Amino acid sequence: MNPILKKSIDLIQNRIRETAHLCGRDTNEIQLIAVTKKIQPELIREAIGCGLITFGESYIQESREKIASISDSSISWHFIGHLQSNKAKYAVKLFNLIHTVDSIKLACELNRQAQKINKVQDILLQVNVGMESSKSGVSPDDVLDLAIAIGSLSNLKVKGLMTIPPVYNSPEMVAPYFQNLRKLQDIIRNEKIPNIDMKELSMGMTGDFEVAIREGATMIRIGTAIFGERG
């Protein structure tokens, strides 16, 4: 076992537990997604040996090679990068959950490809809470309409929302963006749309995951704090 990696993972898990305890949440509600972009399969196998079971990838080609190499059916793979419609056929074959659906065009193509392999694909809707031109995601004003449109697609199941907030020096500065995502979750849940299950909130990364947990995150995406800076 890699002692440095094990120490990093233990530290993150302890911080998750402490934060959950402080805000009265059950640690089991919070899923740690280890972000493995640019991380070699050998190190991912070591992370599996340390007890991690959920991994997040951002690029389809890189993911195809890694997932085939590791070939472990007990592992859950999440796609957390920008997804183009022409890569949808690969995404539905590779990933248990796709975090970054932000248009009806992409949703329809994912639905079509999932139907081909007789799969109901779990997805999250990515919301651009900061309205940043540099980031993907549906606008907060349009996410309800997108959810309603996707609700009619029988081979997709919306499990919740995802966001990447603006970057600030202070983690507390992102709290309002996480709060807004949770409010959107409540609005969509109250509509009781078919095929829409607003259980998950994917928000929070290495620099702000404790704030995200406090604001209701059920999935946090951690790369640097586990694997170190990427080359």
Image: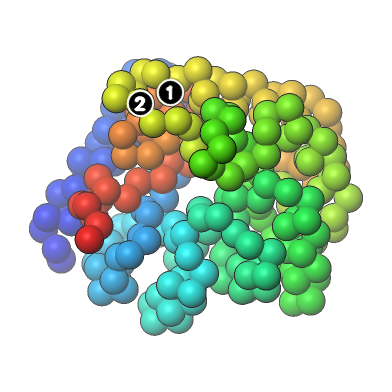
Q: What is the three-letter code of the residue carrying label 1?
A: Val
Q: Is residue 5 left or right of residue 96?
A: left
- Mark 1 vs mark 2: in front: 2
Q: Is residue 192 left or right of residue 184?
A: right
Question: What residue appears at the point 22 percent right and 61 percent down from the top-left corner?
Answer: 231
Residue at the far front in the pictured view: 133
Residue at the far left in the pictured view: 3
| Spatial CA span between label 1 and label 2 | 7 Å
**52, above or below 150, in the image:** below
Crowding at label 2, few (<14), some or many (≥20) Cα neighbours within 10 Å?
few
Crowding at label 1, few (<14), some or many (≥20) Cα neighbours within 10 Å?
many
Q: What is the three-letter code of the residue carrying label 2?
A: Tyr
**59, above or below 107, in the image:** below
Q: Which residue is mark 1?
A: 174
Disc assigned to residue 189 = none
Residue 61 location in percent, x, y? 48, 74
Residue 190 location in percent, x, y? 79, 25
Question: What residue appears at the point 75 percent right and 71 percent down from the top-left corner?
Answer: 113
Q: In the depicted view, which residue is nearer to us: 13 or 26?
A: 13
